[in-house]
Amino acid sequence: MTKAQFDDLIHAPVRLRICGLLRQVEQMDFAVLRDTLDVSDATLSKHLKTLAEAGYVSLSKAASVSRSDARRLTWISLTPAGRNAFGAHLRALQEIAGITDYTQSPGRRD
Amino acid sequence: MENDFEGRPSSEEAAASLRDLGADRQALADGVQVPKMLLAALGGVAAWWVAGAAGANPGENYEPPTSGWLGLVAALVIAHLIRRETGIRFRKMGPRAALVMAAIPVLCLILFSISLGLGSFGARWAVLLTSLSAFGLVTWLAGIAFRSALDQLRR
């Protein structure tokens, strides 16, 4: 079981939501993440940069046949360190919220 | 511009954050369009493979058609295209999706065997029916698997 550890870097609202969505998947396209969070490209890029610098997310580019210009699809995923940090942060939130039965927590998945 | 969070949240704020994460998962799953054409393409590959039994000669010198490998490659390409179209590479698809995904090749093998049997009795025309069945059933099952994976995203 992951030990609870509050992470100030993750807890910024948009970054918390980014990690929450990425935790559910192996990889997600930048555009899908942006549309789900309903934020601008610049805002999402800024927060992804912060998470990437902390080693919590990784970004990879892939060619897109549906685009005529040079832009590429950007796939984003949580790194193992990011997954662990987010899991520990979730536990900290659950403890703060007083949720002792983790199976009933809305943030729980594993 | 958003400020970074400073200090620990209250229990109400922590509970609200957890609820928001659940809402985001729901929004993600709701926002994904089921790639119906690509799922139908999977059904098409299955139909094409089953139809290949019409040209086979079951018996002592039976050699399985190489279309099986081509079908496998085509299915992998379609799976890749589904990921590209939806923008999501699933981490866990859930037990129901896994069961359905395992049932698809079994179903195809059964329909292929029936088709071989029909061919050996000279009823090659009837392979059209097994081929159409493969198309319909695989498209339907692939849709169930995809929707199950979306349900898994919500949890």
Image (cartoon, coloured by chain):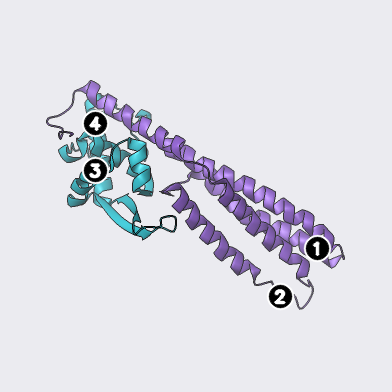
Chain colours: A cyan, B purple
Q: What residue is shown with label 1?
A: B117
Q: Amino acid at mark 2?
A: Glu
Element carrying mark 1: helix
Chain on which label 3 sits = A
Residue kind at label 4, given as amino acid type: Leu
Pointer 4 residue: A93
Residue A30 position within the rendered picture, expressed as x and y whole percent measured from the top left: 33, 47
Q: Earlier in the sequence, mark 1 or mark 2?
A: 2
Q: Name the residue beneath numbered marker 2.
A: B63
Q: Is residue A23 visible?
A: no
Q: Which residue is mark 3?
A: A42
Above or below, comparing residue A40 to residue B80 in the picture: above
Front label number (3 vs 4): 3
Question: How much space separates mark 1 and mark 2, taking CA atoms?
Answer: 15 Å
Q: How far is disc 2 from disc 3 in space, using C-alphas? A: 58 Å
> For the residue marked with disc 1, what is the amino acid?
Gly
Q: Residue at x 77, y 61 (%)?
A: B115
Chain under disc 2: B
Work out which quarter of the rendered image holds the N terminus of chain B and state it: top left
| x 26%, y 30%: residue | A94
